[in-house]
C-alpha cells in the first residue's frame, strides 16, 4: 500500500491555543524530537502579529534557534499576509503556509477580510513567494463546515482549491477546522476534486477531532487517494478552557493505524508516543491522543487479573 | 444508507473496571437514561461471581430494580457459565451474552479454562439458553489480536464464529478487547466471514479505542456489511489505574458519524451527550469520548476571537 506523508502541526496548531506559555527552548526541543522521530514536514510556528497568539509570539526566536533544518526536513511557518512572508524570508525560511476560509463568516473573524479580499490578497502573496523560490501550502479552513454558517458547499471547496492552485500553491490543506466532517463527506469532496482534474498529490487533509471522527475521516481520505495528512502529537490543540475544542488527529494514533495497515509513514511510533508524554508533562494536562496514553499504561503495566471476566 | 443498530455496553463493560463503586440507584438511572435516549439493546450487568467484579456485584439488585424492559427494549446480562444462565433465568431475563476468547492465554486468564473447554461449555450453555427461549449473544474476545499472544489468525476467528453459530447463538460480537485492530484487518475478517457464508446480520463489532482506531474500525466494518456496533457512552471503560486501557467506541461519536452520514441509529445525539456528562460527573473523572465534551464546551461557548488566526 502507498506510503503516507505526515505534516506535523504540533508546534503551531497544536500549541497556539494552549494557556501555559512554553519557553522557546521547550519548543525548539519539541521540534528536534519531531525530527528525531522521523518527521520531514513540521510547521514550527506562526508569523502572525505577536499579540494575536501569545503562545507563538516568540516565532522569530524559535526560527533563529532552529537554524537550517537537517537534510530532507522542511520547516514551515504560517503566514497571514505579505508582512508574514517578508518575515519568513528574513528568517531564511523556504516553506510557508498561507490560509483563508471556505466560509465568509469564519474568514472575517479569522482574518478581518472577506473571502474575496483574502483570495485577491493570496494571489499576490502566493505569487511573490513562489517567485522568490519558496514552497507554498495554502490552508482552506472550514472546508467541511463552518461553526457560524453550517454547511459549506463542496463545489465551492473545489473551486477555491483550483484558484489556490492557479496562484501557484504547491499544496492545499483542506481544514476541518472545528471537526464537523464525516467520512462520506470527505470522500465526496475528494472524488469531486479528482473529477475536476485536481492532482490529489497536491491535497492534504487537516482534520480536527472535535467529534471523534478525525481518524475515520483520514481513513476515508486515504481510500479516496489522499496521501498527506496533518497531525498533532497526542492530539494537542484546541482551547483548554473549552472542553471539546479539540486538536488535530493524533500523530501517534495515525502512525499506528497506517503502519499496521502496511502503509509506511517514515515516523517512529514509540518515539512519537514519548513526545506525547513529554507534551502532556510540559503542558501539565492530559492530552486526548490514545496511543501515547497506552504507551504510558504499558510502562506501568496493567495485566488482566486472572479469573476476571473482561469480555 | 442502511440504518445502524447500537448495542450499548456502558452499564456492564463501561463500568466494570471503574474504581469508584456506583450505587445501584445510579446504575438504574443510567439504564433509564439510555432507554430514554432511544437505545433498544442495553447490556445492564454481569452475572459473574460477585467477587470477580466488585462494581457489578449488585447485579441481582440492578435487575430487580429495572424489572421488565419497556416494549421493544432488550436488557442483556453477561453470563460466564451455566450458573450465570440460571441466575439470569431466575431474574426473568430474556437475553444473555456469553463469552470466550479467540486466544488461549487470554481465555485462560479471563475464564480459567482452555479455549477448547470454553467451547465445549458454551455448546451446552448456549443450547440450554436457546431451548429455554432466551436470545443468546456470544462475545469472541481478542478476535483482532491478543495482548499476550499477539496476532490471532483470522481463519480461527471464522471457524469459532461458525461453531458459536452452530451452538445456536443468534449474534456473535467480535471483540477487539485491547484495541489492536486496524481497518484493513476488520475488513479482512468481515470479508472472510462473508465468503464463508456467515450471515453478517448476526455479527456485531465490539471495538475498544486503546489506540484511537475504534471509529475507523467501525467505519471499515460498516463498509464491509456489518450493521451492529457495540458502544459505551463517553467511551467509558478500561482501567482508570492504567492510562490508555481504554473503553469502547464512544456512543455519542458513533451516533454523530453515522447520523451525519445518513445512517439512522434511532438514538438521540444530544441526550447521549448529556448521559456522557452525567457519567463523567458520577465517576468524577474526564472521559475520552469527544462529542459529549464538545457538547459541554458548546454550552460554555468558545467563539473564535475576532482576528485570531486559527487555520
Image (tube, coloured by chain):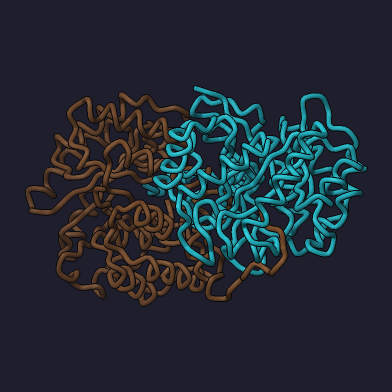
Chain colours: A cyan, B brown
Q: How many marks?
A: 0
Residue B74 seen: yes
Q: Nearer the viewer, residue B153 or A91?
A: A91
Instruction: Name which residue lies at 27% across and 30% down.
Output: B116
Is residue B192 positioned above or below A177 on the image?
above
Q: Nearer the viewer, residue B49 or B72?
A: B72
In percent of width and height, residue B52 lies at 40, 55
Vertical arrangement, residue B177 with respect to residue B24, above or below: above
Question: Vertically, is B38 above or below A90?
Answer: below
Q: Nearer the viewer, residue A70 or A99?
A: A99
Seen in the image, is A159 located left or right of residue B217?
right
Q: Position of residue B51 (x, y in %)?
A: 39, 59
**Point 48% across, 56% down: residue:** A152
**In this image, B53 relative to A295: left or right?**
left
Q: Quadrant of residue B14?
A: bottom left
Q: Position of residue A307 (x, y in %)?
A: 40, 46
Identified at 66% across, 43% down, the residue is A138
Res. B52 visible in picture: no
Front position in the image: B269 or A204: A204
Residue at (83, 28) in percent of width and height? A70
Residue A18 falls left or right of residue A63: left
Residue B214 x, y percent position in the rendering: 44, 45
Residue A71: quadrant of the picture:
top right
Amino acid at each position: 500500500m502507498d506510503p503516507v506523508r505526515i505534516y506535523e502541526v504540533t508546534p503551531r496548531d497544536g500549541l497556539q491555543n494552549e494557556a501555559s506559555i512554553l519557553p522557546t527552548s521547550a519548543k525548539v526541543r519539541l521540534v528536534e524530537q519531531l525530527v528525531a522521530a522521523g518527521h520531514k514536514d513540521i510547521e514550527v510556528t506562526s508569523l502572525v502579529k505577536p499579540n494575536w497568539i501569545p503562545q507563538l509570539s516568540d516565532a522569530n526566536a524559535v526560527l533563529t534557534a532552529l537554524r537550517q533544518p537537517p537534510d530532507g526536513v522542511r520547516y514551515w511557518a504560517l503566514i497571514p499576509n505579505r508582512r508574514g512572508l517578508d518575515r519568513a524570508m528574513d528568517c531564511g525560511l523556504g516553506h510557508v503556509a498561507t490560509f483563508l476560509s471556505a466560509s465568509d463568516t469564519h474568514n472575517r473573524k479569522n482574518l478581518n477580510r472577506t473571502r474575496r479580499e483574502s483570495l485577491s490578497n493570496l494571489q499576490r502573496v502566493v505569487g511573490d513567494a513562489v517567485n522568490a523560490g519558496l514552497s507554498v501550502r495554502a490552508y482552506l479552513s472550514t472546508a467541511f463546515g463552518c461553526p457560524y454558517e453550517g454547511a459549506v458547499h463542496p463545489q465551492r471547496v473545489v473551486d477555491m482549491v483550483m484558484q489556490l492552485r492557479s496562484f501557484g500553491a504547491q499544496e492545499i490543506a483542506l481544514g476541518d477546522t472545528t471537526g464537523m466532517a464525516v467520512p462520506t463527506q470527505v470522500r465526496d469532496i475528494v472524488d469531486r476534486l479528482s473529477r475536476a482534474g485536481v492532482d490529489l498529490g497536491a491535497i492534504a487533509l487537516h482534520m480536527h477531532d472535535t467529534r471523534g471522527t478525525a481518524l475515520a475521516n483520514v481513513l476515508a481520505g486515504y481510500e479516496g487517494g489522499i496521501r498527506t495528512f496533518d497531525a498533532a502529537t497526542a492530539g494537542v490543540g484546541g482551547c483548554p478552557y473549552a472542553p471539546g475544542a479539540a486538536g488535530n488527529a493524533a500523530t501517534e494514533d495515525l502512525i499506528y493505524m497506517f503502519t499496521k495497515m502496511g502503509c509506511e509513514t517514515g515516523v517512529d511510533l514509540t518515539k512519537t508516543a514519548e513526545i506525547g508524554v513529554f507534551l502532556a508533562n510540559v503542558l501539565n494536562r492530559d492530552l486526548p491522543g490514545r496511543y501515547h496514553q497506552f504507551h504510558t499504561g504499558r510502562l506501568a503495566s496493567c495485566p488482566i487479573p486472572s479469573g476476571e471476566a473482561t469480555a
